[in-house]
Amino acid sequence: MKDVLVLFYKVQLIDRNIDKLEEQRGDLPLTVEALESKLEALRNAIEEKREFKVSAAAKREENNEKTKELLENQKRAKAQLYKVRNNKEYDMITKSIDAADAEFTRLEKESEALVEQMEAADEEIAELTPQIEELEADLEHKNSELALIKENSANEEKRLLAEREKLVAQMKKSDYSLYTRVRGAKRGLAVARIRRNACSGCQTIIPAQRQLEIRRNNRMYTCEYCGRILVSSEVATEAGEKEEHA
Ligand SMILES: [Zn+2]
């Protein structure tokens, strides 16, 4: 009977290891995903600044053209001043010259502001670029780490599954279906052991008399509280559980 109990415990240890591998694999892709979205955000930020620079340069060019046009018109207006015939005409031309002056000032200010904004965009791009390079290197590192872990874990999982298959072949069908049923119901932990006088699955204290019975290793007991298969620490150790987990 003890062999049967050890078998149960061995299968459980393997299943716990397979669970751990799956957990490990689960975390890394998330880390990589987070890095990727951060990188994308930075790249978008740079792209926006570059686009801004292009449109700002176009706007400046447009302002220059307008200024040139205004100057031409103003020059013509100034020449006309010498040919005016009455005050009304003189006032009209003077007004248009003043309006052009105001527009010059406005365009000039706008262009100055654009230059400042373009310089700021340049500075921000210069700041973001090394951050992106750093992230790219980090991501590359994480990706190769992930590939390596996936490979190792796939190999390890294959080995564990082969070992598991051998053990399961030695189990009675009814024992194995009991194991899978309890494992399914108890979130992966089907077999518990006595640890500090309690069930290691639910921490409920086991009466001394029952502990004695379990330690005989001559029949299968289940925890009265959580329903897990309950074995002695001797069985757990024999199945290969490390002392530090005891
Ligand atoms: Zn229990």
Image (cartoon, rainbow, N blue to C red):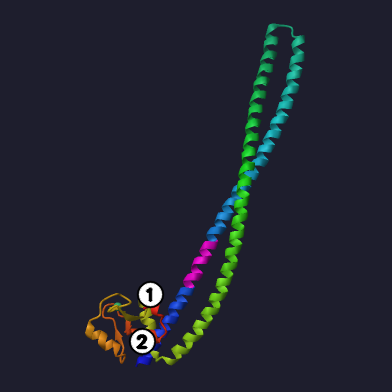
Q: How dense is the environment of label 2, judged by Cα within 10 Å: few (below 14), some, or many (20 and up)?
A: many
Identify the residue at image location x=62%, y=44%.
49
Identify the residue at image location x=67%, y=11%.
91
Indicate the position of residue 5 as horizontal and vertical percent values: 36, 88
- Tell me the kind of residue under disc 1: Arg
Q: Which residue is mark 1?
A: 187
Q: Quadrant of residue 148?
A: bottom right
190 horizontally vs 71: left or right: left
Q: Is residue 52 magenta?
A: no
Q: Quadrant of residue 151?
A: bottom right
Q: Nearer the viewer, mark 2 or mark 1?
A: 2
Instruction: Name the quarter showing ligand 1.
Output: bottom left
Q: Is residue 114 above or below residue 27?
A: above
Asked if residue 186 can be seen in this view, the reply is yes
Identify the residue at image location x=53%, y=65%.
29
Depth check, front residue: 174 or 3: 3
Depth check, front residue: 106 or 205: 205
Tally of marks: 2
**CB under 8 Å between callouts 2 and 1?**
no
Indicate the position of residue 192 as horizontal and vertical percent values: 34, 80
Residues rendered magenta in the picture: 22-32
Q: Which residue is mark 2?
A: 235
Identify the residue at image location x=51%, y=79%.
157
Quadrant, the N terminus:
bottom left
